[in-house]
Amino acid sequence: MAMRDVVLSVSNLTPKEKERVKEKIELMGGIFSYHLRDSTTHLMVGKVGSQKYTKAVETGITIMTDEWVDAVWEESIVRNIVSTDDKFNKYKCPPFYKLEITTSGLEGVEREKIASLIDENGGKYSPQMKKDETNILIVLKPAGQKFIYAQQWGLTCLIPSWIYNSAKNGYMIETENYIVKNTMLSSTPALSNVKPVFSQNDISEITVEPKSTIEETVKKIAQLNANK
């Protein structure tokens, strides 16, 4: 049985996906658990960063991507295999798995280096910051339009060393010591009450909604001013 001796829990999967994984695990001789417990051997994630993920890192539980069980299932149909064979090491979870990350205020060389580390370690680097898509903004200091919008959208803003240290350690490290705090919070009015002033870089790098960009907002403001 391919999953013998495996006690699996999952994180960041839909309820339907969990039930599908549960069925396959049990058919392959493994044990499925909805919760992490002392006997858990593996955590399979659809995305890094959950509480389960953090706990698994702390306790040394092996973390796999959401492709692992399906890969073992397909292989077990044609030959006798064990899910922990070396051939399945490629499904070990990289530190930025399924995270979409952007940057602001970084020089070209460092930005390119960080973009490469993100892409090489399971994440997706995007020059644009997209509402409801971007997860993390990497920034040196609490300044710039990207940072302001990130605060409004509730995005996590972190210093670049978080990328380097996570890549070095091989897992997503806790963000607490890397957060860029909004020092302007008490003195800055709500964004909706502020007339925006955008640079060309800001306009091209912030996407408010899938079909609506800051550039469109700027055009609307210009039209309103022209009609006054």
Image (spheres, helix red, strand yellow):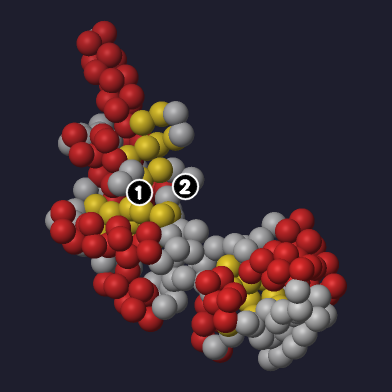
Residue pushed farthest front?
79
Viewport quadrant of the C terminus: top left
Question: Is 59 rendered above or below residue 89?
Answer: below
Q: Quadrant of the N terminus?
A: bottom right
Q: Examine the image and state in which quarter residue 182 appears.
A: bottom left
Number of residues whose C-alpha sits closer than 10 Å to that of mark 1, classed few (under 14), some (14–19) or many (20 or more): some
For the residue pair 129 and 192, the one nearer the viewer reads as 129
Helix, strand or loop for disc 2: loop
Q: Is residue 109 above or below residue 1?
A: above
The answer to whether marks 2 and 1 mark residues whose Cβ atoms lie closer than 8 Å is yes
Q: Identify the residue position indicated by label 2 in the image.
A: 133
What type is the residue that disc 1 sits on? Ser
Density class for disc 2 (Cα within 10 Å; few <14, some 14-19, many ≥20) is few
Residue wearing tag 1:
126
What residue sits 62% from the left and 64% below the top? 67
What is the C-alpha distance between the residues marked 2 and 1? 10 Å
Which of the 4 quarters of the picture holds residue 7?
A: bottom right
Q: Is residue 4 left or right of residue 201?
A: right
Q: How many marks?
A: 2
The kind of residue on which mark 2 rests is: Glu
Residue 89, how many percent across, how many down? 55, 77
Q: Quadrant of residue 38?
A: bottom right
Among numbered discs 2 and 1, the one appearing first in the sequence: 1
Q: Residue at x 59, y 85 (%)?
A: 61
Q: Position of residue 40 (x, y in %)?
A: 69, 85
Specify whether residue 149 is in view.
no
Compared across the picture, whether 112 is left or right of 121 comes to left
Q: Residue furthest bottom?
A: 38
Residue 207 shows up from this direction: yes
Which residue lies at the image location 59% right of the left edge and 62% below the top edge?
Answer: 46
In this view, the mark in front (2 or 1) = 1
